[in-house]
Image (cartoon, rainbow, N blue to C red):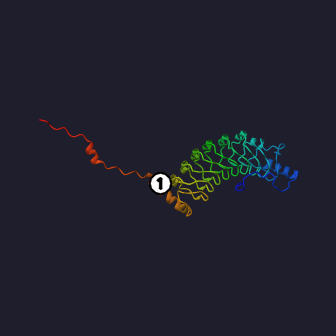
Amino acid sequence: MLGGGEPSGCSCGVGTPHHTARSLDRALEDAVCSGILNLSGRKLREYPGMSYDLTDTTQADLSKNRFTEIPPEVCLFAPLELLNLYHNCIKCVPEAIINLQMLTYLDISRNLLSVLPKYLFSLPLKVLLVSNNKLVSIPEEIGKAKELMELDVSCNEIQALPAQMGRLQALRELNIRKNCLHMLPEELADLPLIHLDFSCNKITEIPATYKKLRQLQHIILDNNPMQSPPAQICLKGKVHIFKYLNMQACRMDKKPDTLDLPSLGKRCLPQPLTDRY
């Protein structure tokens, strides 16, 4: 897996190995032949490949540089399947990214994003990594990302998850660690999640409907003020958590006892007419 998991912020002054102009040219020449562009860790502020035809590029690694925007040239790589922009200074995603209709893997973690644009979810993404940014929300349009299998929005400032995330029928891994979440949407209960991490939030309750997450293998929920299930049950692990959720669901599904009102009914029924004669 590329990128992710480091402190937030843009460290544009971090020292990286020195690369000569010749080594940069060699990397660009190799990309022309292989379709794989690797410009990672070169302190680049501007895209250097203007003199090379890289329109056949299928993978581009621009991580650990100083880009303040996604280079417009990269958005013209129509066959691009993987784009790694980890650890730059990018503040927004341009609309031109919709040209990348083959893109399945996007890592834009550890940048300066405050918004995920709606048009991003018109791409056939399977992996989207946007940890360590400045996001405060996720747009409802995320529900359009039907092929998304892994979503990492950890280490942001997100306050709520949209119910439309329940439409991500391919989602296997969800990392929402270290945000400002107070609740989990019940709609996630219908997803085929295998890994769920919502640690380091402000969540007090796991919805009883989450008992339907039968494929879930890993659940990480530490550093939340859990009340339901109680913290002592959460500490025992997944099996005990799901036993509790099952019991809660049974209590909620149980119908109230039918009221027995035969005597009341007798009082209310009109008395039968009697023959006066």
Which residue is more in the foreground, 2 or 113? Answer: 113
Tell me if residue 232 comes above or below residue 43 in the rendering: below
In this rendering, position of residue 88 left or right of residue 221: right
Q: Name the residue rendered at 44%, 52% in the picture.
A: 253
Q: Position of residue 233 (x, y in %)?
A: 53, 62
Which residue is more in the foreground, 43 or 13? Answer: 13
Neighbor class of circle 1 (other Cα within 10 Å; few <14, some 14-19, many 20+) is some
Residue at the extreme left: 277
Q: Name the residue rendered at 78%, 52% in the picture.
A: 11
Q: At numbered mark 1, what does the secondary structure look like: helix, strand or loop?
A: helix
The N terminus, quarter of image: bottom right
Figure disc tally: 1
Tell me if residue 199 comes above or below residue 269 in the rendering: below
Residue at the extreme top: 277
Q: Position of residue 275 (x, y in %)?
A: 14, 37
Q: Position of residue 230 (x, y in %)?
A: 53, 59
In this rendering, position of residue 75 left or right of residue 266: right
Which residue is more in the foreground, 68 or 167? Answer: 68
Q: Name the residue rendered at 74%, 42% in the picture.
A: 75
Q: Name the residue rendered at 65%, 43% in the picture.
A: 121
Task: Give the residue at mark 1.
Answer: 249
Residue type marked 1? Ala
Q: Position of residue 179 (x, y in %)?
A: 64, 52
The C terminus, quarter of image: top left
Which residue is more in the foreground, 51 or 193? Answer: 193
